[in-house]
Image (cartoon, grey):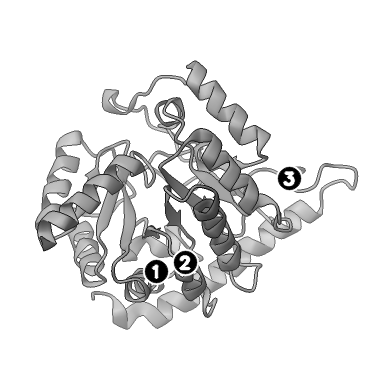
Amino acid sequence: MQGCRDAPLGDFAAARVYISLMTIVIDTLNKAPLDSPPREAGPRHPEKAHRPDNDIQRKPDWIRVKAPVSREYVATREIVRANKLHTVCEEAACPNIGECWTKRHATMMIMGDTCTRACAFCNVKTGLPGALDIEEPANVARAVKTLGLTHVVITSVDRDDLADGGAGHFAQVIDAIHAMSPGTSVEVLTPDFLRKDGAIQTVMAAQPEVFNHNLETVPRLYLNIRPGARYFASLRLLQQAKELMPHGFTKSGLMVGLGETREEIMQVMDDLRAAKVDFLTIGQYLQPTKKHARLDRFWSPEEFASLESIARAKGFLMVSASPLTRSSYHADSDFAEMKKNRAAKTG
């Protein structure tokens, strides 16, 4: 793998940046007035407040989406609210929320709405999270059953403050869904569990049908885009998931538009195939605010189609590559196709 000999220096530099960012996040929130609501007093992204502004580029026609207005969308939102849940659809300002929620497909985000990381691309709130909700596994399972989902994606914020990174909570959610909806397949999109020994073993012991962890970008951009993460640690996590459940499915995702090259993307594809990852998603980065990472450019639909062809040629069972592709977009139908492709390949 390219870049291994630079890892020690990169890790040290990234660690200093991460510690600095976390200090800013926690200090800003702690200085809020005593009578303010907990964890809501400070800005949504305090660690980005002093960054220079990056102009937000006008979106091309192929990225435009309609505002969510359907009755089914409203019904899905009410079910989410009734069970006191968070969704990555809302927190990350996903452009597909109208389409997905109209189909009652909501991606649950567990362990709160506040992340301990400060990734430059992400719109999820950062800060010091609260305690875990012990009723959340049951609430998630109830919502999944009410929505009538045959396949559900469960993701979370990063919880570096927890000894196991939240792995035990993930396992409880998986178990609760399987118990309440035995016919529902569970796809987990987890954090990297960096330096959390035994965490991946805990998650995989609950036997999710799909284990997903996004690499997000190419190794060269990690220090700026994912300062709290390590490319090769994330890659190893995916490899471990496959080793622990060889007959399960593993999945990862990339964004384009952050300054990566086509050649770098193809190298990441090779790294993922070496880790025996089955499913790759590739989508366009959309800059949430002026304080987030600068959008380098919009990739065209033709370029996405080319990336998909290359990825399929490299041996992925399933590939979804388009400007609006996100990790959980069409996850149910993609899971069905991935199973069909494996059966055709092995049969």
Q: Mark 3 points at which residue?
A: 42
Q: In this view, does 265 lie to the left or right of 146?
A: left
In the image, is 1 to the left or to the right of 166?
A: left
| Mark 3: secondary structure | loop
Choose the circle earlier in sequence order: 3 or 1. Answer: 3
| Quadrant hosting residue 242 | bottom left
Label 3 neighbour load within 10 Å: few <14, some 14-19, many 20+: many
**Residue under label 1:** 234
Residue where numbered disc 2 is placed: 192
- Kind of residue at disc 1: Ser
Q: Hey, what amino acid is under mark 2? A: Asp
**Disc 1 and disc 2 in contact, CB within 8 angstroms:** yes
**Quadrant where the image shows the C terminus:** bottom left
Residue drawn where x is 45% and y is 39% of the image: 149
Q: Residue sitting at 58 percent across and 61 percent down? A: 172
Q: Where is residue 126 in the image (x, y as percent from the top left)?
A: 62, 52
Whether residue 22 appears in this view of the structure is yes
| Vertical side of 328 occupied by 197: above or below | below
The percent position of residue 247, horizontal first and vertical second, equals 29, 67
Q: Quadrant of the N terminus?
A: bottom left
Crowding at label 1, few (<14), some or many (≥20) Cα neighbours within 10 Å? many
